[in-house]
Image: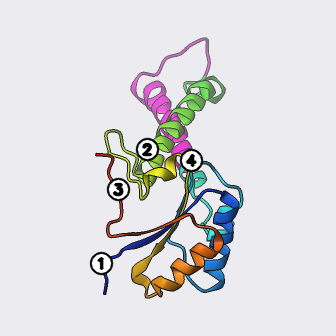
Amino acid sequence: MSDIKYILGLFEDPDDMMNGIDKLQDNDISVYDVYTPMPIHGIEDKLGVKRSRLDIVAFICGITGTCTGFGMIYFMLVMDWPMNVGGKPNFAIPDFIPITFELTVLFCAFGMVAAFFYRTHLFPGRAPRVMELRATTDRFVIAIDANKGFDNQKIDNLLKEAGAIEIKHNDRKYVSYE
């Protein structure tokens, strides 16, 4: 078994890269990941990326904010310190809609930022993890896991046929900026 972990095909043109993905998938070779310097429409469907569940996280965070807002208002104005203001009931729901709305938005915003940082591993102060440094500027990169039992020479030939300008065999997962 070789110590090559990933085979990287570097492309100059996104159309060539999409053609390379098609050629690899036609030959039953699974693509580990694709790195691009800009968004490419339709690549998620081609790679089989699942739909994000971020909307569920947003809903849960929003409901938590709503419940916290109503719970705080109920505790403060009904149980802890009830006051008679102009003969209104202690828990007049229409009066507390603005505060509840603001807490819903606040909890949702902070929850979404935390979920985004957790899911993408982009915590503040963490060094970026990049497989190929030029993928952030001008290259389109297809990464194939070399330990899946595919023939490396066949993969190299398929990438060259698709228009890869360079093929790299990495022995580690990420490249550091140092």
Give SS at disc 2: helix
Instruction: State the separation of the CA atoms marked 1 and 4.
Output: 42 Å
Scheme by which the image is coloured? rainbow
Q: CA distance from mark 2 to mark 3?
A: 26 Å
Where are the magenta residues, as a range? 59-88
Q: Amino acid at mark 3?
A: Val
Graded by Cα atoms within 10 Å as few (under 14), some (14 to 19) or many (20 or more), the crowding at tag 1 reads few
Q: Position of residue 177 (x, y in %)?
A: 33, 46
Instruction: Give the residue number, with chain letter if any, for mark 1.
Output: 3
Front of the two marks 1 and 4: 1
Sequence order check, earlier mark of 2 and 4 = 4
Q: Amino acid at mark 2?
A: Ala
Q: Quadrant of the C terminus?
A: top left
The residue carrying mark 4 is 58
Q: Residue at x 61, y 11 (%)?
A: 86
Spatial CA distance of label 2 from label 4 is 11 Å
Magenta: main secondary structure equals: helix
Q: Is residue 12 magenta?
A: no
Residue that numbered label 2 is attached to = 114
Please tell me which residue is depicted at 44% across the width and 32% down the height of the picture: 75
Give the spatial CA distance, label 3 vs label 1. 16 Å
N-term mark: 1 or 4: 1
- Distance between the Cα atoms at labels 1 and 2? 36 Å
Q: Earlier in the sequence, mark 2 or mark 3?
A: 2
Residue sitting nearer the eye, 163 or 29: 163
Inspect the image, locate mark 4, and give the three-letter code of the amino acid beneath it: Ala
Q: Secondary structure at mark 3?
A: loop
Judge the density around disc 3: few (<14), some (14-19), many (≥20) Cα neighbours within 10 Å.
few
Three-letter residue code for mark 1: Asp
Q: Which residue is mark 3?
A: 175
Q: Give x and y (percent) for residue 120.
A: 45, 52
Q: Secondary structure at mark 4?
A: helix
